[in-house]
Amino acid sequence: MVDYIGIERIRQLVARRGAARFIEELTSEIEADFLRWNEFDKSARHATHSTVGVIELMPASDGRLYAFKYVNGHPKNTAVGLLTVTAFGVLADVHTGYPLLLSELTLTTALRTAATSALAARRMARADSRVMALIGNGAQSEFQAIAFHSLLGIRGLRLYDTDAGATDKLERNLARLALSDLEVVRCASSAAAVQGADIITTVTADKRNATILTPEMITGGVHVNAVGGDCPGKTELHPDILSRADVRVVVEYGPQTRIEGEIQQMPADFPVIELAQVLAGRAPGRAGDREVTIFDSVGFALEDFSALRYLLRIHHEERGGEQQIDLLPDLEDPKDLFGVLAGELEPFAAQRGVAA
C-alpha cells in the first residue's frame, strides 16, 4: 500500500496548521534542502510543448529519496472552466524503488512557490520592505500574499490584474483571512501598482513574451519576485530591466532558467547567481539598499522534493485522515506476479471450457 494525499487530505493538513504556518514550515524544508544542494541529482525539467500549453516532468533525488512532479501549464484553460496549472507527484525510496507517497501537487505547488518566493526575498529584499505590488491576481496570488505578509512583514498590498474579476476574487479571499494589519489597495494599472512598492511580484499566466514591467517602473532598491515567466516564450520583464548595471539576478537552477525564465531573453553568458549560493552565504542576495534585485523563479524540482517529504511527514503526524491506495501488488512470492490475476481468470477459463 502507498500513502495517498488527495485534495480533501491537503485541505485538512493546511487547515489544521493554518496557511501561514504551513508555508513557514515548508519554507524551512526547502531552505534545508537548498543548503545541501550538492547532494542532489539535478536536471532541467523535461517539457513537451504544444500550441496551447506545456506538460512537464520534474525529477530530483538526493540518493535516498526520489521525487518527480507531473505539471501542466495551459493558460487558456480558464475559458472552459479548467485550471491553468495542475500537478501531482510521487516520492519514492531509492533503495527499493518503491513509491512511498502519491500526492496532489496542484495546491501544494502554489504553497511551495510562495514559500520559495519568500525564502529568496528574505535574503534579497531590503529589510525594511513593507509594501508589495502584486501584479497578476489569479490562482497563485493569495498564496504569495500570505507568504510575504507572514514571513517578510508586508503590510501593504497594491493589486492589479487585466481581469477585474481576478482582483475581485483576491480581495474577497484576503478579506476572509481577516488580516487587520494588511492594507489592500486596488490599482488601475501595473505602473500605478508599483508606485511606492518595495517588492514587486509578477505572477501572470499568459504564454507569451509579455511586458508586464518596463524599465521606468523599476526604481533603485526594489526587489522583483518574477514568478510568471516559466516556460520558453513566456516572460514578464522588459529585457532592458535585466541589463541594468545595478541589477542582481538570482535563479534556482541556471540550466533550467536560461531556457524558461526571464533570462531566456539574454545572452547565454548573462551572469546569474543560484539561490543555493545565496542561502549558503557564498554570494550576497543584495549588495546595497539601492541595488535592484530580481528573483527569476521558474520553480525547480528540489522544491517539490521538499514539499513531498514534508507532506509525508505531516500526513503521518496528523492522525485521523491517513489514506493509502493499492498502487502496488502485495505478493507472497515476488516472482509470481501472474498469481495476482490467476484467481480472477480461472472462472473465465472454466466458462470457455464449457462453451467449447
Image: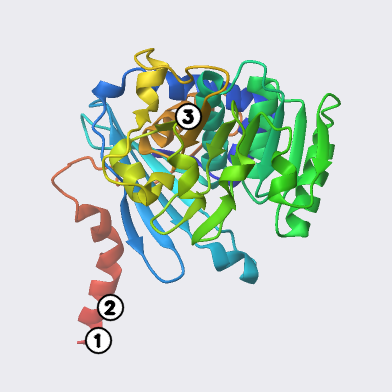
Residue designated by label 2: 351
Residue tagged 3: 246
**Real-space CA distance between mark 1 and mark 2, rounded to the nearest whole angstrom:** 6 Å
- Is residue 261 among the parts visible in the rendering? yes
Crowding at dot 1, Cα within 10 Å, few <14 / some 14-19 / many 20+, comes out as few
Question: Which amino acid type corresponds to the residue marked 2 in the rendered image?
Answer: Gln
Image height of 277 relative to 329, above or below:
above
Q: Indicate which disc, 2 or 3, sits on the residue closer to the N terminus.
A: 3
Query: Hey, which quadrant is residue 9 in on the image?
Result: top right
Q: Secondary structure at mark 3?
A: loop
**The residue tagged with tag 2: helix, strand or loop?**
helix
> From the image, which quarter does the N terminus lie in?
top left
Q: Residues within 10 Å of mark 3 (few under 14, many from 20)?
A: some
Residue beneath label 1, please?
Answer: 355
Q: Nearer the viewer, residue 251 or 147?
A: 251
Vertically, is 104 above or below 92?
below
- Per the image, label 1 sits on a secondary structure element best described as helix
Quarter of the image for residue 89 reads top left
